[in-house]
Image: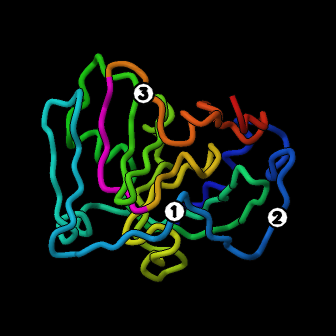
C-alpha cells in the first residue's frame, strides 16, 4: 500500500484543511438517489482529445493495473475522513492508454446518474487520482459510488464523481454539475475554495 496522506504539505501546513472537522464515519451525499447498474452492460468510455478512444467492460476495467493507497477524503460540506484505503486504477494509467493529445487541457468526468465534474488536466494526471473499485479491502459500496468512483485527495470530494462511467478530454474547460451551480472550479481544501 502507498501512503499519500502527506500530500497536504504541497498545499498547507496542516493535514486537516481549514474549516474541516475529522470524522470516523463516512457520510453519504449525492445529488440524487443511487443509480442502478448492470455489470453485464456497464461500459467505461474514454473520449475527446485522445489518440485512441477507449471502451472497457466491467471485467476489462477490473483487469487494469491497480494499486491501494491510503488517502484523506475532504468533503466540501466540512468533514474529512482520514486514512481511507482505496484500491483502484491511477488516472495516468487511463491517460497513457488513450494517448492524450497535446491540445487537451481539461477533463470532464461523467457518471451513471448524469452527474458531471471537471478538473484541469494537470490536476488529474497525479498518481493519487484513482478510479476506485474497493474501499478498506472490500468492493466499493453502492452508496459510496460503487462499482467505480473517482477520488481526488488534493481537492474537495465533489470533484470525484461517484458511479463514474466515462472521461472526456477537452480542449477547453467545461463546467460540471455543481460547478454550474456556484461551486468552486478549483476546489482546493487548503484555500477553502468551496464556492465561486
Secondary element under disc 2, as helix, strand or loop, is strand
Q: Residue at x 67, y 59 (%)?
A: 72
Work out how far the residue at label 2 is from the one at label 3, CA to CA, in angstroms. 32 Å
- Numbered-mark total: 3
Q: Where, quadrant-wise, is the C terminus in this rendering?
A: top right
Q: Does residue 159 show up magenta in the picture?
A: no
Residue beneath the point at 21% across and 38% down? 47
Residue with the mark numbered 1: 32
Spatial separation of the CA atoms under disc 1 and disc 2: 25 Å
Q: Residue at x 54, y 61 (%)?
A: 2
Q: Which mark is residue 22?
A: 2
Q: Which residues are drawn in magenta? A: 163-170
Instruction: Please check the rendered image and state whether residue 165 is part of the magenta-colored stretch, yes or no.
Output: yes
**Is the residue marked by circle 1 packed among few (<14), some (14-19), or many (20+) residues within 10 Å?**
few
Q: Quadrant of residue 83?
A: bottom right
Q: Residue at x 44, y 73 (%)?
A: 134
Q: Which mark is residue 174?
A: 3
> Is 145 situated left or right of 78 in this image?
left
Q: Position of residue 136 (x, y in %)?
A: 55, 78
4, 155: nearer the viewer:
155
**Helix, strand or loop for disc 1:** loop
Residue 162: percent from the left, percent from the top?
A: 46, 60
Residue 35 lies in quadrant? bottom left
Q: Nearer the viewer, mark 1 or mark 2?
A: 1
* SS at circle 3: loop
Kindly report which numbered mark, 1 or 3, lies closer to the viewer in this rendering. Answer: 1
User: Which of pointers 2 and 3 lies earlier in the amino acid sequence?
Assistant: 2
The answer to which of marks 1 and 2 sits earlier in the sequence is 2
Amino acid at each position: 500500500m502507498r501512503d499519500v496522506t502527506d500530500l497536504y504539505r504541497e498545499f498547507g501546513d496542516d493535514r486537516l484543511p481549514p474549516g474541516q472537522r475529522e470524522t470516523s464515519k463516512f457520510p453519504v451525499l449525492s445529488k440524487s438517489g443511487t443509480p442502478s447498474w448492470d455489470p453485464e452492460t456497464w461500459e467505461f468510455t474514454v473520449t475527446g482529445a485522445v489518440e485512441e478512444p477507449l471502451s472497457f467492460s466491467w471485467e476489462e476495467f477490473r483487469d487494469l493495473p491497480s494499486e491501494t493507497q491510503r488517502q484523506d477524503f475532504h468533503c466540501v460540506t466540512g468533514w474529512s475522513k482520514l486514512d481511507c484505503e482505496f484500491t483502484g486504477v491511477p488516472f495516468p494509467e487511463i491517460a497513457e492508454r488513450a494517448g492524450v493529445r497535446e491540445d487537451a487541457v481539461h477533463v470532464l468526468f461523467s457518471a451513471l446518474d448524469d452527474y458531471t465534474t471537471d478538473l484541469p488536466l494537470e490536476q488529474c494526471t497525479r498518481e493519487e487520482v484513482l478510479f476506485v473499485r474497493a474501499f478498506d479491502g472490500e468492493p466499493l459500496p453502492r452508496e459510496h459510488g460503487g462499482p467505480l468512483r473517482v477520488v481526488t485527495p488534493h481537492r474537495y470530494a465533489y470533484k470525484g464523481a461517484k458511479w463514474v462511467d466515462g472521461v472526456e478530454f477537452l480542449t477547453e474547460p467545461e463546467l460540471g454539475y455543481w460547478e454550474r451551480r456556484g461551486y468552486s472550479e478549483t476546489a482546493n481544501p487548503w484555500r477553502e475554495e468551496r464556492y465561486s
